[in-house]
Image (tube, helix red, strand yellow):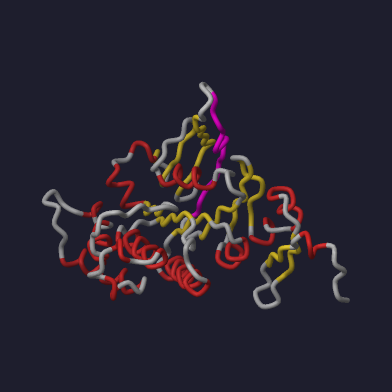
Amino acid sequence: MGILTAEKVSYRYAVYRRGATLLAVGGISLDIAAREFLGIIGPNGSGKSTLLRILSGSLMPEEGRVLFQGKPLSSLPQSQVARCISFVPQNTYLDFPFTCREIVLMGRFPHLGWLGLEDAAGLAVVDEVMHLTRTEYLARRPITDLSGGEQQRVILAQALAQEGEILMMDEPTSHLDIASQLEILDLLKSLNREQGRTIVVVLHDLNLAALYCNRLLLLREGVIAAAGTPAEVITQESIARVYGARTLVEKNLRTALPNVVLLPAHLSDRPQDG
């Protein structure tokens, strides 16, 4: 059994028509090993975000259960879950002008005593994670004044301040330019390799998923369509079957990992050189 285990978890959303429901996650079982870097991929509406919320404990499954180190997540106090799992949702709505340092300090709430006061060690953690995420210069800026990419780095710093054994992020590279995407994922990879953090991320970019994740889950309509290494999961056949897209999947000559080349309709029928 891994550090986190899902046992046949399912969840349905109510839709506008009376009595109708929409299956988001259907009977998924998986083990997440300690120190793993797991990527969850799949088309829009395939259940990625719902599954991540279930794994994080922020959404209770209608069927099945999630275990942390063999104990049902639902049986643990919320503060203990927050010390075990740091979760960053895809959209974090921030409309009150807290300073960035105050936002990061909020990540320390699971570790506060009954007086709610942070000690020197906790403040040192805040300084460290703001340094790691290159947000020190934003410490006194209101979070509402920042760009989307800057906000993303501050929210990541907040999650790191929780010091959870598992870090879960839903689309951590959204709103970021190419350089910032690599910067964030490089940081996550460093946390995984050097600090032993277990990382679980939802990603849309298949090439980034192949470059950074040790294992991938490919979802389709709420179930696992494929699971394994990037080379096992990211294939022309699986992309065509799950996404309905025409692609060319080649082996990256430098990394030996799969690299997805999109084939737009106006180009895909052209003869290739050679």
Q: Position of residue 45 (x, y in %)?
A: 57, 44
Q: Nearer the viewer, residue 193 or 24?
A: 24
Inspect the magenta stretch and tell me whether residue 24 lies in it.
Answer: yes
Q: Position of residue 174 (x, y in %)?
A: 49, 61
Q: Nearer the viewer, residue 142 or 133?
A: 142
User: How many numbered markers are drawn?
Assistant: 0
Report the span colored magenta.
20-33
Residue at horizontal 35%, vertical 74%? Answer: 134
* Residue furthest to the top: 19
Residue at horizontal 38%, vertical 40%? Answer: 73
* Residue furthest to the left: 115
* Residue 33 relative to residue 60: left or right: right
Residue at horizontal 79%, vertical 65%? Answer: 267
* Residue 142 relative to residue 263: left or right: left
Residue at horizontal 36%, vertical 71%? Answer: 133
Report the quarter where the C terminus lies.
bottom right
Q: Nearer the viewer, residue 125 or 2?
A: 125
Q: Nearer the viewer, residue 89 or 162?
A: 89
Q: Position of residue 154 (x, y in %)?
A: 34, 64
Main secondary structure of the magenta stretch: strand
Q: Position of residue 147 (x, y in %)?
A: 38, 66
**Picture layout, residue 82 above or below residue 235:** above
**Picture layout, residue 261 above or below residue 48:** below
Inspect the magenta stretch and tell me whether residue 60 lies in it.
Answer: no
